[in-house]
Amino acid sequence: MLIMQLALPNLLALGSRGVWPDLLVLSAIIIALRGPDIHNNLLQGWFLGFFHDLTSLAPFGIYTLMLSVCVLLISGIRHWLYLQNILIFMFIAFVLSCLIELSVFTTMLFRGELEGGYFAPILVTIIFTATYNAALVPWLAPLVKQPQWKLL
């Protein structure tokens, strides 16, 4: 997923704002829903976040922290989720994408890397990106419904 996200940004981009899906966030959601246990899920989420940090301009460590927390939360509640309904999976992808990108924006705002006047355009881009992530869920749903795998 990391290679796809780095190699195909122009093919995946939509609109003039350059909205593209965050494939690493979607990968973290799939890992959290399918992974065998919470420890392996957390480790894989940490690595996904670390690689996301290496390839983004956001403050280093924010994606590592956010993806790890999201994987931990989803792994903890996945037993109560009815994953046969695609709308639940889409809702999870939309909400987590919004939360992660809003936390990155807030961190950059408090560090003084952005000015407050950029809130509206960035919020629109965050919502479009989260919607794009949620729209990709029907193609990723079969990965969640297959038998679980083990890391080692």
Image: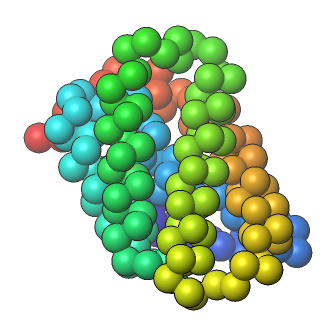
Does residue 7 appear in the picture of this structure?
no
The one nearer the camera, 136 or 56, is 56
Q: Is residue 145 left or right of residue 86?
A: left
Q: Is residue 149 above or below residue 4?
A: above
Q: Position of residue 37 (x, y in %)?
A: 21, 29
Q: Residue furthest right?
A: 16
The one nearer the camera, 54 or 34, is 54
Residue at 41% across, 43% down: 70
Residue at 59% across, 28% down: 89
The one nearer the camera, 150 or 83, is 83
What colour scheme does the image use? rainbow
Q: Is residue 4 above or below residue 7?
A: above
Q: Is residue 57 above or below residue 86?
A: below
Locate residue 120: give its quadrant: bottom right
Residue at 37% across, 41% down: 71
Q: Position of residue 25 (x, y in %)?
A: 50, 52
Residue at 82% across, 71% down: 121
